[in-house]
Each structure stands twice: as structure tokens, then as C-alpha cells.
Image: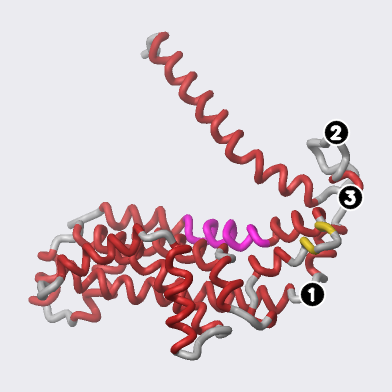
Amino acid sequence: MSVPFPARARRIGLNAAAVLFCAVWIFPVYWMVNTAFKPYGDILKPTPGFLPFPFSLANFSDAVHKSGFLTDLANSAVVTCSVVLLAIVVAFLAATALTRFHFFGRRSFLVGVLIVQMVPQPALLIPIFLSLKSAHMLNSLFGLTLTYLALVLPFTVWVLRGFLQGIPVELEEAAMVDGASRVRIIRTILLPLVLPGVIATSVFAFITAWNDYVFAYVLMKDQSHYTLPVWLVSFSTSAGTDYGGLIAASTLFALPVVVFFMLIQRRLVAGMTAGAVKD
């Protein structure tokens, strides 16, 4: 059966608009990668080249051999992985308590979570700084991890609460009748069904901890405790900016986020499929 011309024209128009939108969205990323592979002299040419010719890896070599790269990379990896794991565990337990148990102040807690989520992060900088200072955790990766955890928990709790609300309590009650413990119910019933929410919150926690510059710069005074976003600023000095090294470093900085998303993409789809199937 042939598709009517108006419907076909509408579909073609929507597809063309989607392709145009994707091209506009991805062009800055393409230009960053394209520039990273250009020789330094070609970067500053008044006439831009849309292909990196001649091809060069000098910018990446300069970025990797930049002072502090490996140390700051290790700091970012430790802090980010810790934040993701802690956020998932704490948010899942908090969301389970909010959806499965009725206690005094539950609604007030939910309102508080929503209000904290609305507060701009720069407004929290001074209170967090004073709190960590009084706790003697300034210039500490552990203190930075707690800071990022506090920033991502309101969102992660709220999202996981929404996923858990969609799971019928009768599934857990039936498992309890069969003799399943609370731990086994969480592991075999709740976690598989709430997996899409876990993946979504882990992506948010990862990006928040990996990309932050302000908190890492203010709370860390020792250069050996800096993270990669602070390391990127070292390419701009009073003598000028190393554009080649900066763009190559930015490309390297973006790679872990892309790799992380590619690794969890299949699990996200599998989790959504599992969550959609109910006996």
C-alpha cells in the first residue's frame, strides 16, 4: 500500500529537519576533533580547513606530556568512579525507603530533595567550602567526592523514586510469601526492573563529577589533587594559549564520557526491555 503524498512529504520534511539538527549539534564536536589533528600552524590560518591535512599527532603528544596529566587523570578517575558507585547505592536505598515505607516526614523530605535540586550549584560553593573546612577535608579527594555526591544525590533519588513507584508492590509480596529475603528481592526483582533508572542516574553522576571545574579548583589547593578540568586550564597562561594542545586535551577529556556511554548503552536497552516485561 503506497503512502499518500502529503504524509510522505511530511515524513521527508521531518527527517530532513532531524538530519539538519543533528548536523548543527555535532559540528562543534567534529570541529574540535578536526582541529586536534591539525599542525599548530594550520590551526591559526584565516581560512579554515574542513579536513586535517596534513595529518598530525603533535598536539596529542604535547597534551599527554603536559605536566600533571597522569596525576590529574588518576584523580578524576578515582573521584568520578567513587561518586557513581556511591550515588547509585545511596540513591537506590533512599528511593526504596521512600516508595516502600511510610514514615513521618516523608513528604517533607521529598519536597526538600526537589528544592535542593533547584538551587544553582554556584550558590552552594561557599557553604560546602565552609563545611569541608570545619571538617578538615579541604584539599582532599574524599571531600571532593562527598561534594559531588551531595550535588548528584537529589536528582538520582528523585529519578529512581519514579522508577520504583512504577513497580507493583505485589511482586515483592509474592516473593516474600515464597520465602525470599529483602536482600534477594532487591537483587532479583527491584534491580533488574529499575535498571534503566540506575543507568540514567549513573550517566548524570558521571558527567557531573567528570566535567566539574569550579568545585575542584576552589576546594583543591594542592596541584597534585587537581582533576582534569583544572588541568585543561594550564594550557592558557600569561604568555598565551596553546590552542593545539588545549583542543587535543579537550578531545582526550571527552573520550571517557563517550566510552562510558557506549559501554552502558546496551545495558540501558536491555534494562528497558526487562522492565517492560511483567508476568
Q: Residue at x 27, y 52 (%)?
A: 276
Residue labelled with disc 1: 67
Q: Quadrant of residue 72?
A: bottom right
Q: Quadrant of residue 68?
A: bottom right
Q: Earlier in the sequence, mark 1 or mark 3?
A: 3
**Residue with the most extreme bottom position:** 136
Residue 9 showing in the rendered view: yes
| Residue 64 relative to residue 98: left or right | right
Which label belongs to residue 47? 2
Q: Residue at x 76, y 45 (%)?
A: 34
Which label belongs to residue 276? none
Closer to the observer: label 2 or label 3? 2
Closer to the observer: label 1 or label 3? 1
Residue 193 showing in the rendered view: no
Q: At numbered mark 2, what does the secondary structure look like: helix, strand or loop?
A: loop
Q: Where residue 127 sits in the image (x, y, percent)?
A: 42, 74
Q: Earlier in the sequence, mark 1 or mark 2?
A: 2
